Image (tube, rainbow, N blue to C red):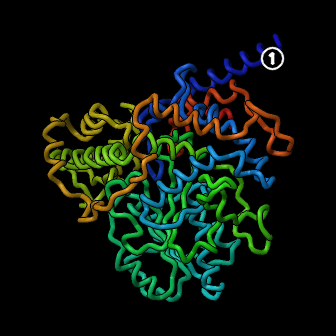
Amino acid sequence: AAAKAAAEKANAAEEKAVKGKERMGSHSNDSGLSGAITDEALTDSSKEDMTLFQTILSKLAKTTAAQKAAKKAKAQAKIAQGRLESFLNFQTMVMDRTGLPVFAASPMDEATAVVWLIGMALTRADFKKPKFFIDNRMHPQTVAVAQTRARGMGAELFVGEWEKVENFSDYAGVAVQYPDKNKVVNDYTDFFAKAKAAKSLTVCATDLLALCSLKPPGEMGAEVAVGSAQRFGVPLGYGGPHAAFLSCIDSLKRIIPGRIIGISKDVHGNPALRMALQTREQHIKREKATSNICTAQALLANMAAMYAVYHGPEGLRNISSEAHIKAKALAVGMTELGHTVLHSTFFDTISIQLKSMSADDYMKKAVAKGYNVRKLSETTISIALDETADDVDMQALLECAGGAMALSELRVKAEAMDATGGLGRTSSFLTHPVFNTYHCEMEMQRYIYRLERKDLALNTAMIPLGSCTMKLNAASQMLPISWPEFGNVHPFVPVEQAAGYQEMF
């Protein structure tokens, strides 16, 4: 026992030494990943620096091993009602936000989800149309992964501008980003209508937080929506892990990968949850399977679900609206300093043509103040403002551009400004009681505990299955996940700002 304690102490000291090599700063370069706040109400105050990672691990995710084991047994649903309820919350949240009636799975990441959809499009077209179109304003990592994976699928990937697509009948599917990689808000209604008329699958990669303020893809005519749930309380973690999502129209439910949680009844007539659709090859006949996914991202999906349950529709609208207003205020300030904002529509990110200074000059000043921005050209930059940005950050970014300004005046002008192009959200979302009940810390923690008590886990029973089901992480190994030096590092920061990660790699 003494040797074990000494080893854990040495391990913790080494982890802290590595942590000290990370350079902490604000990330204003987005690229599909944004800073997120994990609320104290979703933490266990009895443990130092414990974030939602460990809260869910210590509560809901005690059942991770149980769930993996139970997936191999017919009794799975009986011993995982808490986990299934949380995943049903995630499912409902995504369907409401995207405006589409069917939700499936929690893919590894947004790029992987898009690759799945290329396969879906080819399947729906009976592989008679091998071409798939991707807009060049999707996130660069999505385009890169799709290009690599498409070759192995026998698909011909075409990357271009969505406005210039003409021969829709050539493509098994088309994919766009909403808002796009520069957070420009485009109306794809006519584009989707033309694609559907040619029987081309319409895919929209999107941002869940933006959809609290913007018209959902389903209302534009998208047949499938995908994206990342990272913005819902999940730290950046230098790129992951983050749960992605996939929702679609009803007619596609037999070719989607993943799983659907359904509400049923038990033998006593009480409401019970189960897997209503399973597509994994371990569950059904291999020739009918469309997925071999495991439970890899279920924990991350539950984290995002709890974030939505705690904040509810009004809280999420406020977070989304605040990010949007801050971006508009920064746009007004940059314009008054003589610079040019390149797009009239945007959500939380603006592209700026700098006047009398180069992009490198601005970035050098920003890095000195602790900020990273994205360079678009020699004179153009992109700045993203997520929910973690405050007035101090905005003032610093304006100072880098030429001077301090009265933020209260900028905000007044921003609130009178429309940057959605008439695509503001009018439909309601998250109307179910679960999203409108647990908004205080005590009730939220009680709810998490009630879900935990519904599951069978290793803290209450022995699970007689081996393989991947028996791997557990020690508390000392999980603690660093909560440290901001590891959790709040954006994957696109310069390598020298992530020396600790490089050492671990």
Q: Residue at x 47, y 45 (%)?
A: 232
In which quadrant is the N terminus drawn?
top right
The image quadrant where one finds the C terminus is top right
Question: Left or right: where does residue 152 sit relative to residue 49?
Answer: right
Looking at the picture, does residue 122 appear above or below residue 243?
A: below
Q: Quadrant of residue 123?
A: bottom right
Q: Is residue 428 left or right of residue 48?
A: left
**Is residue 3 visible to us here?**
yes
Question: Would residue 502 be found to the left or right of residue 31 on screen?
Answer: right
Q: Residue at x 37, y 46 (%)?
A: 316
Name the spot of residue 45 as percent of width and height, x first.
52, 22
Residue 315 x, y percent position in the rendering: 35, 43
Q: Secondary structure at mark 1?
A: helix
State the image quarter where residue 277 is shown: bottom right
Q: Residues within 10 Å of mark 1 (few under 14, many from 20)?
A: few
Task: Say if residue 377 shows up in the picture.
Answer: no
Residue receiving disc 1: 4
